[in-house]
Amino acid sequence: MLNLFQAEWCPYSAAVRERLTELGIDFVARQVEPWPEQRAELAALVAEPSIPVLQTDDGQIFAGPEQIFAYLEGLPAGERAAEERGRYREHAGERRLELTNQVLERLAPLDS
């Protein structure tokens, strides 16, 4: 099982999640701390604890979107890859409107 060290707010993490979905690859999302200097677990794997980072089941590490996408390009497309990309495109307007932000802002405020 792949481990994706990521954060929901990170657009690069979102792009990797979308591509993994298109490829039909299950993964475990490992949430990281908000600031790089807080990411001790990730720093044990990579020199620069920036996200996203993908760890394969055999322990290979791909850090950053360029390395991750280069690795993923070598994998076969999932059966529904075109359909998944089409659905992604269909929801572009909602992403531009930041609907997730609107929903989250209606929730109780979090302590900072």
Image (cartoon, rainbow, N blue to C red):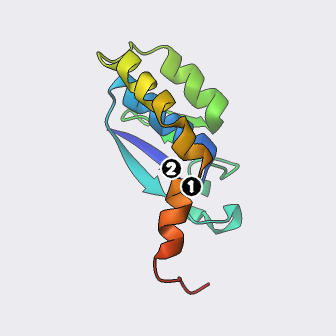
**Residue 48, above or below 68:** below
> Which numbered disc, 2 or 1, marks the residue that appears first in the sequence?
2
**Residue 32, above or below 111:** above
Please say whether residue 7 is visible from this viewpoint: no
**Residue 23, above or below 91:** above
The residue depicted at 42 percent of the width and 16 percent of the height is 75
Front disc: 2 or 1: 2
The residue depicted at 53 percent of the width and 83 percent of the height is 109
The residue depicted at 41 percent of the width and 50 percent of the height is 29
Percent across and percent down for residue 107 are 46, 77
Q: Distance between the residues labelled 2 and 1?
A: 8 Å
Pointer 1: what residue?
A: 42
Pointer 2: what residue?
A: 5
Percent across and percent down for residue 60 are 49, 33
Q: Identify which amino acid the numbered label 2 is placed on.
A: Phe
Percent across and percent down for residue 99 are 52, 55
> Within 10 angstroms of label 2, few (less than 14), some, or many (20 or more) residues?
many
